Amino acid sequence: MGVKIIEIPKRSANYYLRVNYKGFRKTIKIGTNKKLASEARQKIEAKLVLEGIDFLKPIDRPKVPTLKEYVYGWRDENDQYQIGWFDKYAKKSKKFSTYSGYESIIKSHLIPKFGATHLDEITSRMVGDYVSSKLDGHKSQTVKNIKHCLSAILQHAYVPDGHILSNPCRGVTVPIPEKEKVRAMEDGAEPDPYTWEERAIVEQVFREHFPGFYPLVLTGFRTGLRIGELMALQWANVNFDARLISVKKNISRGRRTTPKSRSSIRDVRMTSLLIEVLKEHRGALEKEAAAKEEKLPSWVFPNKLGRRLNYGNFMDRVWNKAQENTELRRRTPHDMRHTYATLRLLRGHSLSEVSKEMGHASVEITFRTYFKWLPKESHSNIDELDGGNEVKERKPGANENTQQDGLRLVSA
């Protein structure tokens, strides 16, 4: 018989009792009070002697909240209010777009299914069955988002809060149904960049019909910045002397926030034409501000009032109309970014260099996304495979079976 006090995870001050009695094992959560854990161990040892397996009766254990309680807040066994996961973690550590998405998933999917279930009752099998059932009416990416949200909640319930012994979402995968793979191939779900000629047409349309937004479009095509990064760009981030634009902010769901990822915080080089156009653009903004006796707007691409550009207004009043004028296949502003990447790769620019300036987290992402546009020409000498560091010339009449092509590899 043995009853041990353990910490899960180690050195976390979350105390549990590990009971091992005649082959029967059980782990009981106690809390963060080691003295209480010691007292509970003594009670359990006494009950094992007197009652055997009856130690399973409740023994001064903290209340394990339901999923809904843990997310939004609850009162513990001492009637003390505990702040919920959403206010305690999500709002403080996640971007607005992320926790807004979480909030929608929690209300629409997780609460109806797991809301009344205590955290320590949620098992990996339950999560797996739920994921499988969701695939019947939702796309796999939607189901992945639901599972990731649940996993984020339960991970905090595991560490640091210690309500559960492990995260039941770990190991649960979301398969991609074959019909989705086929549909993706049929729909051509891949970048749709402009060609060199099409890019010239788009730029000409903006220069003639929407001249105030020509600098924005040129910047998009020449730097590969996301549309949110373009809208968030300020003059303090444009260094004409160093020929660099420093990407430090992004506009997402109408809010100015950090870029998409850590790697998205980057410096991007400017072409000579872009520098010339942006300098002229700044000069025009300075004249307008001076005429109104105002300061130069901090935004590189402001609206008519000098404030931050609104994405919806830009799409409705500018981009969509310009698309009609080009008479080309309709694209989105994000395709300016795709165009930047594909035209550079077609010119033979380094994949790693393009990846870094686009702000991708890894070269693998760039490779997977733009593999189709990598140069197909091979410039290396394939005949070098016939020799090593040293090559022996062909001997007249040499036996082809013993001396392949008359060449002998001296070293690997």
Image (spheres, rainbow, N blue to C red):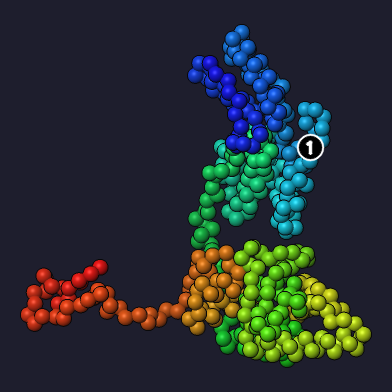
Which of the two residues, 209 or 18, is positioned nearer the viewer here?
18
Q: Is residue 48 left or right of residue 231?
A: left
Image quadrant assignment for residue 63: top right
Which of the two residues, 347 or 279, is positioned nearer the viewer here?
279
Quadrant of the frame with the C terminus: bottom left
> What residue is at 59 percent from the left and 43 percent from the top?
169
> What residue is at 52 percent from the left and 51 percent from the top?
175
What residue occupies the far left of the structure in this picture? 397
Above or below, 394 against 118 in this view is below
Which of the two residues, 138 or 73, is positioned nearer the viewer here?
73
Image quadrant assignment for residue 226: bottom right
Image quadrant assignment for residue 394: bottom left
Amino acid bearing label 1: Gln
Q: Position of residue 377 (x, y in %)?
A: 40, 81
Give the class, few, some or many, for how many residues have Cα within 10 Å of label 1's Cα (few <14, many ≥20): some
Which of the two residues, 100 or 174, is positioned nearer the viewer here?
100
Total labels: the figure holds: 1
**Residue tagged 1:** 82
